[in-house]
Amino acid sequence: MLNSFLRRPVWLIITGLIIFGITFASGCSKVAGPAAKDSTSTSAPEVTPRVAAQLTSTPEAASTEEIPPTPIKELLERPLYKISANLDYPNHQLIVEERILVSNPAGKFLDEIDLVVPPNNWPGVFSIQDITAGDLPLEGYSLTGVTLSLDLGDSGWQPDELLELQIRYTLNLPPQNSLRGYGPSPFGYTSLQTNLVDWYPMVPPYQEDEGWLIHKPWIFGEYLVYPAADFEISLNLGTPGLIVAASSASLTEGDPLQYTLSEARNFVFSISPAYQVLEADLNGVKVYGYILPGYQVPGQAALEASLQALTLYQDLYGPYQQASLSMVQADFNHGMEYEGLFFLSRGFFDTYTGSEKSYLVTIAVHETAHQWWYGQVANDQALEPWLDEAFCTYSELAYYENLYPQSVDWWWATRVNYYQPSGRIDRSIYGFQDFVDQYLSYRNATYLQGAKFLAALKDYLGEEEFYRFLREYGFRNRNQIATSDDFFEVLGEYLDLKELTWLGDYFLIK
Ligand SMILES: [Zn+2]
């Protein structure tokens, strides 16, 4: 597959590279709610009688009366989020009604569900109006840090029940990057854009031994672990003239904007009145660039690199699964991946050199690779960050090797060897506290040394076998949260792991 890719003469087909702006009619309807309050334990105001979910309709033969149809609640393979949000863009406020439908993932009785609420990591941002749990009685809830614990009481949540949560809440968005002591996050607003990322209460994975898996936010890296989910989102803008980038393309053109997305890790928005929109079509996949004024040249370069990467990685790793991908110019110096959308640091647009030997290109293709290693195959980003970051840094090398072989040496020298990375790649984001510069040590090990490991593995296996292995690993773990054990289990089918005498250069060998 790789060879056929290389032989392709003119492979990049961009149709309809156009710039357009969209304005939306106003019509925001606000929901009144109480003022924001601190994280406290409180009782749920509404308690409804518990009725077990019906897996099948059960008409009783004994009665001759007509029986009204019983609503059938099918168990869901993935959590389903139905979110209706009203944005007050000028006042940086979002009023949200969220429904989560989730099947019991434990296979046993549970008396509690924990949700992860990333916005509550910012003080004064997240405030709950009310929570209900459908047919189940909700005895109370508590919000501590980013964990929202819902007490389902003695009658609890049975293995064959579908839980329907409804949460009404308000987000008073913070200025972007306002969290003292932490690395940048796109969440919040700048003078030019508002970013809704990790903005709603989410169902974390459930582990048999540990229960609900919620890690603590850390000063760098990512701490969230995303089970695959389905989304139905409605966004009411109210303010005219706003342009919206999202994890999928809107099904509607006016207020409210409506979206669906399946088998996805999350759903995010970036909204601005200033975006210029670049659009391309890659064999049916819509690829968008959302660019700030004055950045046309680097914007097109970043979009083209993303298109090239999307094409290459489909050859190397397997098909891209979503219908669109949006590249958004961040109004700050930080990049971040999400399902179907990524932010690319403004600093890279400022320093674009006009050639592929530019971090704008390098990081655009890195973030594109996250659609496979993060999106399709997720990992525990806190405990095993190498499982997406090493893969995506390696993917930069794959891009240069396949498209710009003359720039491979530049990539190694500038991106990796300059920093002289060494040591273990399998530490958690919390595992660098003994290092002088925690972040740099984390970056050098997880990203750079991690890429060296995968490059060494490719040299050992040979290119064709290496990518066959990666496709198989990706295929088996699609929509799952993969672990290092999963990685080595599949790798063990391609070679005898004992042959890798140098594995101790990268991993703690048990
Ligand atoms: Zn990354």
Image (cartoon, rainbow, N blue to C red):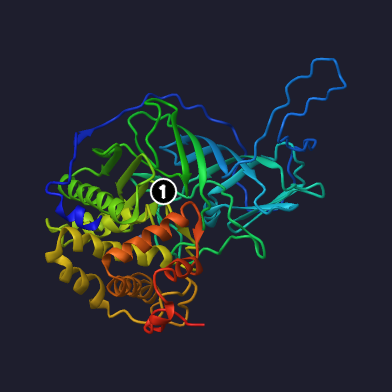
Q: Relative to residue 55, is residue 457 drawn left or right?
A: left
Foreground: 292 or 369? Answer: 369
Q: Is residue 352 above or below residue 90?
A: below
Q: Circle 1 sits in a helix, a strand or a loop, which is it?
A: loop
Return the residue at label 1: 339
Q: Relative to residue 222, is residue 49 drawn left or right?
A: right
Q: Quadrant of the N terminus?
A: bottom left
Q: Residue at x 79, y 25 (%)?
A: 59
Q: Quadrant of residue 67?
A: top right
Q: Relative to residue 294, is residue 116 drawn left or right?
A: right
Q: Residue at x 74, y 39 (%)?
A: 45
Local packing at callout 1 (Cα closer than 10 Å; few below 14, some 14-19, many 20+) is: many
Q: Quadrant of residue 239?
A: top left
Q: Residue at x 15, y 50 (%)?
A: 8
Q: Quadrant of residue 500?
A: bottom left
Q: Is residue 275 above or below residue 332?
A: above
Q: Residue at x 53, y 30 (%)?
A: 30
Foreground: 473 or 296? Answer: 473
* Residue 473 location (% of width, % of height): 42, 60
